[in-house]
């Protein structure tokens, strides 16, 4: 409907208890078949009728037997369904004070009874067009807001995808770096320990060569899931570091605590019992883990140095027979 005003129908609702007034207004509009006419003889039903029919203009008498015209005007403006419909006040009074109050109370226009047919139709068309343009703007705004929400959600999903490893479904190296930066700053500010663990699937090249790349991919997915599910705290973070390597960020965790977490991860992978006839440490898939721990700000260790120490510890684990955890403080 947006973008074509001709799709809207000009509809006038007259609120006036006098039948003669209603007949007179209807007669004035009879020559204009594109203008629909609705008559409400009881002002107590006016708000309900306006909600039901959705007129483009309301002609509203001021002096009515049951309800003051200004009070009814206030009801229109406080009703979210019809609050924006133009209201043209009708009255036999020409006092400036009455006109001023009408506009003050929220009326869109003011006509004295009986209105001139040409002027009445002109004002009906003018206010209807303004109302239709308002509806179009609202529709376009709602559409824009909906598209903005869709774009925001799409951006969030794309960002999530950019931080997720496509093969294993756990966070990737980029996400690891972000989390480590964040936790490093927090640990430095709070003077709390921070630990990093690097782990490597033992003899993975031999596994790939012997069982095939498809089996290798499935192995990495299962190892990733086991490592991630071995973590006990929401703040602990697991990621695929690259290739057959995985990494953990363990906030507020000292060296001994990190060793325990790493052992849980190592045991979780061993319990998968994935056959590996070419392994050196066992006849199933295992992982070697290196752990480094520090309190940022209390020594000269930088963030990259912490990761380097974890990598050195990993190398020691592999050199000493694999399937084990080595810790460097």
Image (cartoon, helix red, strand yellow):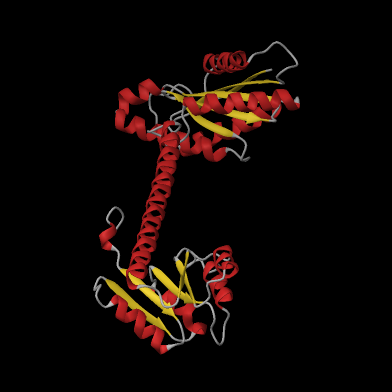
Which is nearer the eye, 63 or 146?
A: 63
- Residue 54 location (% of width, % of height): 39, 71
Q: Is any atom of residue 3 visible in this view?
A: yes
* Residue at screen point 43% across, 24% down: 244
Q: Quadrant of the N terminus?
A: bottom left
Above or below, comparing residue 124 to residue 16 in the picture = above
Residue 323, position in %: x, y? 53, 25
Asked if residue 274 can be seen in this view, the reply is no
- Residue 275, position as x, y percentages in the image: 40, 33
How many numbered marks, from 0 up?
0
Q: Nearer the viewer, residue 50 or 32?
A: 32
Identify the residue at image location x=60%, y=31%: 263
Residue 281 located left or right of residue 105: left
Horizontal side of 189 relative to 179 (left or right) equals right
Residue 279 lies, with reference to residue 70, above or below; the image says: above
289 left or right of 272 in image: right
Looking at the image, which residue sits at the far top? 300
Q: Please name the residue shown 54% across and 26% down the image.
A: 178
Picture quarter with the C terminus: top right
**Could you tell whether 292 is left or right of 162 in the image?**
right
Which one is in front, 308 or 145? 145
Name which quarter of the figure residue 251 lies in.
top right
Using the rendered view, name the quadrant where residue 293 is placed.
top right
Residue 126 position (above or below residue 200): below
Q: Position of residue 310 (x, y in %)?
A: 59, 18
Q: Nearer the viewer, residue 257 or 322?
A: 257
């Amino acid at each position: 409907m947006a973008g074509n005003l001709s799709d809207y129908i000009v509809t006038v609702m007259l609120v006036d208890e006098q039948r003669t007034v209603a007949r007179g207004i209807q007669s004035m509009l009879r020559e204009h078949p594109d203008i629909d006419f609705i008559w409400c003889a009881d002002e107590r039903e006016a708000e309900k009728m306006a909600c039901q029919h959705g007129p483009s203009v309301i002609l509203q008498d001021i002096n009515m037997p049951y309800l003051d015209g200004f009070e009814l005007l206030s009801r229109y403006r406080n009703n979210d369904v019809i609050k924006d419909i133009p209201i043209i006040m009708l009255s036999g009074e020409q006092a400036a004070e009455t006109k001023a109050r009408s506009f003050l109370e929220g009326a869109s226009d003011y006509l004295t009874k009986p209105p001139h047919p040409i002027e009445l139709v002109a004002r009906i068309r003018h206010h209807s067009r303004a109302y239709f343009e308002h509806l179009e703007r609202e529709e376009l705004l709602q559409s824009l807001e909906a598209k903005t929400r869709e774009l925001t959600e799409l951006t969030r999903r794309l960002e999530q995808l950019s931080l997720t490893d496509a093969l294993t479904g756990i966070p990737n190296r980029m996400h690891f770096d972000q989390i480590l930066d964040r936790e490093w700053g927090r640990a430095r500010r709070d003077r709390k320990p921070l630990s990093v663990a690097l782990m490597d699937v033992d003899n993975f090249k031999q596994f790939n060569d012997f069982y095939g790349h498809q089996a290798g991919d499935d192995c990495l997915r299962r190892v990733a899931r086991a490592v991630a599910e071995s973590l006990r705290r929401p703040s602990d973070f697991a990621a695929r570091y690259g290739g057959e390597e995985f990494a953990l960020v363990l906030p507020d965790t000292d060296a001994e605590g990190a060793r325990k977490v790493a052992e849980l991860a190592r045991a979780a992978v061993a319990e998968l019992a994935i056959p590996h006839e070419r392994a050196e440490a066992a006849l199933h898939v295992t992982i070697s883990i290196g752990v480094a721990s520090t309190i940022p700000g209390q020594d000269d260790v930088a963030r990259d140095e912490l990761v380097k120490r974890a990598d050195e510890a990993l190398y020691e684990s592999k050199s000493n027979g694999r399937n084990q955890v080595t810790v460097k403080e």
